[in-house]
Image: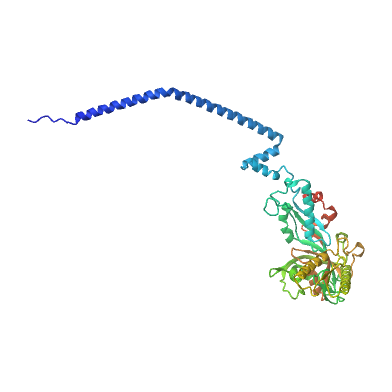
Amino acid sequence: RSRPQTSKRLLPRTHKHHNVISLRKSSITLLVASLLMILPSLVVGFNFRSSSLRAIHQHRHRHIHQVTAFVSTMKRNNPSSTNNRDTKRHHGMTSKSVEDTSSASPSSPPLYLAEGLLAVHKPLTWTSNDVVAYIRGILTRDAKDRNAGGGNDNNNNNKRGRGRNKKQMMKVGHGGTLDPLASGVLVLGIGKGTTQLQSYLEGDKQYVAVCELGYETTTLDAEGDVVKEMEWAHVKSVKGGSDCDSTSTSSIDGVLSKFQGKIQQVPPLYSAIRVDGKRLYEIARKGDVNSDDVEIPTREVEVYGVKACASLEEDVVRSGVVDGRKYREAVKAMKDAESEAAAKALAEGGDDKVDVNDEGGETKKHDNADGSGGGDKKKKHSKKRNDKDNKKNMFSDTTVPSISADNCTFELPQFALEVQCGGGTYIRSLVRDIGYELDTVATMTGLVRTKQGPFVLEDALRREDWNAEKIYAAIKRV
């Protein structure tokens, strides 16, 4: 007989399952009991934390309100300083950086009281860079007196170099060089005005030049040595008349039409034009070099108008025009005095080589007659520098021989030219070429710039008016 099948594993499994359920119930009961025990503590802690956060939030809100009220009061009392501080805070500056940049704050006096352009009158014997340096010195002293730029020369916008300790420099430049023996309008740029000067270098200009027929110099003006002489008597007059053919070389007016419009011009040997990477005046000063020895490239310039005349206007004479004849005579007299002093010193000193100082006839002796040797080389270079300085300082603007109101009317071989031209035109070269067209030679002995752009001679600030107040006033008028 078969017995009913029962699972032997059923009872043991049921027993084990019962035990697991009992264990889980015990664990849940224990966990609930534990939670009931710690629940009061959690409730008390949560309430305490909520109260603390609420108090902190209220304190912070009250503090922010106080700071806002303080800032509003400061803005009402001193708006410029607070705006400056807010601006710096906006850019992420710390309190230390604010202290470091306080010298450049807008509340300090500005470096320039005005920036832009003005015209000054360049005196005779001054270089254009002399004028720039003089004006810069006036404005720098004025800025220092006003404690401008922070008063400690640490203005970051106007310094020479990038170092923090570099001294600030006033930006001053000129818009076109005038030779030392020329006078008249010199356009200057102050501060941001220096960026506008390029247009004045290339812009229109007007000149009055005094010329003389019969000789040509190395520099094409009164400063150079005479290198050519030619007869000029066939030129009968400045203006063409009844006895002159207005289209021939018998009058200066007869050839001027060939020098109007766009023309080809060869710059002077003594000029700043570069040839093979060198300035022409550097090549000329090396030794016995003339314009025929150097291939100077021609360039196109434009002459809008040129007119010959036999007298000068009052404002041109007042500007200062070198008297070429008297200037050459004075220079010759000085050179003769130098030669006599040198010969006398040489006779007294035997075979020793002698250098002569132009100003006092003072002499210096070298150990060797030929001046050779290392030590003598240094003395030779010093001699060159002294000669250049002495030539520059031979005359001042008050002692240089000049044309006066009593002798401002000319007769041939002297005459005057009024020229209106574009940038880059050399008046010295124009006078030379007019001489060649007249079958002779000619040299420019005096020059006045009467206009540059919108600036005219009458409005140029003269030397006696060079002070900070009038300089800034002139800039503001433009």
Compare residues 378 and 124 and report the one nearer the observer.
378
Image quarter of the N terminus: top left
Residue drawn at (76%, 69%) of the image: 375
Closer-to-camera residue (305/160): 160
Residue 196 falls in image quadrant: bottom right
Q: Is residue 297 left or right of residue 440?
A: left
- Outermost residue on the right side: it is 406
- What is the quadrant of residue 269 in the picture? bottom right
The one of 239 and 149 positioned closer to us in this rendering: 149
Please identify the quarter of the rendering in which residue 126 is found.
Answer: bottom right
Q: Is residue 113 above or below residue 198?
A: above
> Measured from the top left, where is residue 340 in percent x and y?
89, 72
From this view, report whether residue 332 is shown above or below residue 30: below
Query: According to the image, what is the colour scheme of the structure?
Result: rainbow
Q: From the viewer's perspective, is residue 114 above or below residue 213?
A: above
Question: Which residue: 65% across, 42% down?
Answer: 96
The furthest residue to the left: 1
Is 179 placed left or right of 79 in the picture? right
- Answer yes or no: is residue 31 visible: yes
Question: Residue 176: x percent and y percent?
Answer: 76, 61
State the count of labels: 0
Horizontal and vertical percent for residue 2?
A: 8, 31
Q: Is residue 209 visible?
A: no
Farthest residue in the front direction?
367
In the shown orientation, is residue 248 left or right of residue 94? right
Q: Is residue 453 above or below residue 391?
A: above
Residue 442 drawn at (x, y percent): 83, 72
The one nearer the camera, 392 or 349, is 349
